[in-house]
Amino acid sequence: MGPCHESKLDVGGWVQVGYHTYNTGMFNNYPDTVQLHQAWGYIGKEADGSCGFDWGFRFDYVYGTDGPDTQAFGNPPGSWDVDWDAGNYYGHAIPQAYVEAAYGDLSIKVGHFFTIAGYEVVPANGNFFYSHAFTMYNAEPFTHTGALATYEANDDVTVYGGWTKGWDTGFDTWGGDNFLGGISLALTEDITLIYTTTFGKIGFGTSASGYSHSIVLDVTLTEKLNYVLLSDFMDYNGAPIEDPAGDAFAHRYSVANYLFYDLSDCWSAGVRFEWFNTKLDIGDRADLYELTFGMNYKPHPNLIFRPEIRWDKDDDGFIVPATDNDQLGFGMDMILTF
C-alpha cells in the first residue's frame, strides 16, 4: 500500500476485571470484590490529512464499575449519559462521540472527546498502574465537549487549541466557555515536554471560573528505564448556581513522579510517588501523599496483568476513607484487548 490511502474503519475494545483491598474513591471505590471495571467498545476512522483532506470519527462506549466515573458529570442530572447507573457501583457511559477533519498537518475534532491534559487516562489499557493518582481524579478533566484543533508544526512541535463547554460536560451542557490548549515539544530524542491548559468557566452547575495547567516531562534515561514528572495547578473560584451567595473554591497543586523499568519482554516494574495539596475553602486545606509499587506482566500481546501495592496518607480525611486516614492495600487487574 502506498503512502496515500484511505484510512480504514477501526473496531475494537477491551475487558478489564480487577480486585483491590483499598478504597481510593477514584475509580477503585468498590473494595474486596472481583469486579468488571471496563467492558469497552469503540468504532472509529482516523482522519489522515497527509495526502490532502480526510475525515474521521470516533465513538466509545463503556460499562462497568468505572462507568459512573466516566460519565459527563459536569452536566445537569438526567442529560447525556449522566445517571446511567446500574446499581452496585456499575454504570454506562459514552466518553467519546466526535467527528474530525484533517488537511495536511492540521486536524480539527468536534464533539465529545477525551482531554489532552495530564498523564494518566481513563481507558485502562493506557496506564501502567491499576489505580489512579490523586492528581488525575481531582485536578484534571476527563472529557470535554466542543472543538479542538491540532497542528503538527514539525516533527518536534505539536500545538493544540480549542473551545469547550467546561470540564466533563456532554452535549446537553451546563457551564460556560472554556479554552483548551497546549504544546508538545520534543526537546531531544529522549526528552519530551508537554504543557496543557484550560481557562474560563469550569461548569459543574457553578459560576466558577479560573485557570488550570498540567506539565508533563517524559525522559528516557536508558533503553529500559523511563522517568515521568507530572505537575498540575488548578485555581477556580466562584459562586454555585444553587447558592449564589455562597463561595466555591478549588485551589490545587500536585507533583507526581513515575519511574518505569523493563525487566524483560514480558515483565516491567514501576513506582509512583505523589504529593497532592488542595484547598476547598478558607481554612480547609489538605495534604495527601501516595506511593504505589506495581508490575506489568504481559504473557500475550492482547493480555496484561497489573498487580500493585498502594499506600495512601491523608491526615485531613479529604479522600481516603480509612482509620487514621492512612491505608495500605493490594490490587490487581487483568486487561484483555480485542
Image (spheres, rainbow, N blue to C red):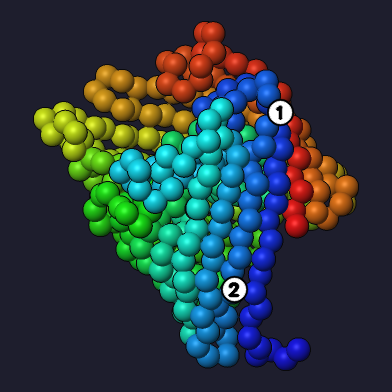
For the residues bearing labels 1 and 2, Cβ distance under 8 angstroms? no
Secondary-structure class at tag 2: strand
The answer to whether residue 3 is left or right of residue 115 is: right
Above or below, 205 against 246 in this view is: below
Per the model, the C-alpha gap separating discs 1 and 2 is 34 Å
Q: Position of residue 123 (x, y in %)?
A: 60, 49
Task: Indicate whether 86 appears above or below 122.
Answer: above
Q: Which amino acid does label 2 sit on?
A: Lys
Q: Quadrant of the C terminus?
A: bottom right
**Residue flagged by tag 1: what amino acid is it?**
Val
Q: Which residue is drawn at 58% across and 49% down?
A: 62
The foreground one among 306 and 241 is: 241
**Residue reaching furthest to the left:** 245
Task: Give the residue at mark 2.
Answer: 45
Residue 48: mark in rendering = none
Find residue 240 and report its horizontal and vertical position in percent.
20, 35
Q: Residues within 10 Å of mark 1 (few under 14, many from 20)?
A: few
Provide the residue designation for mark 1: 34
Give the camera-side residue of 127 and 292. Answer: 127
The percent position of residue 321, horizontal first and vertical second, equals: 51, 16
Instruction: State the image quarter where residue 189 is shown.
Output: bottom right
Considering the numbered disc 1 on the image, is that residue within a helix, a strand or a loop?
loop
- Name the residue located 63 percent from the left edge and 86 percent from the top edge: 6
Quadrant of the rendering where the N terminus is positioned: bottom right
Residue, x 63% and y 56% (percent of image)? 41
Q: Is residue 274 left or right of residue 276?
A: right
* Residue positioned most to the top: 324
Which residue appears at 32% of the width and 63% of the height? 163
Q: Earlier in the sequence, mark 1 or mark 2?
A: 1
**206 in relation to 177, above or below:** above
Residue 149: % across, % down = 41, 71
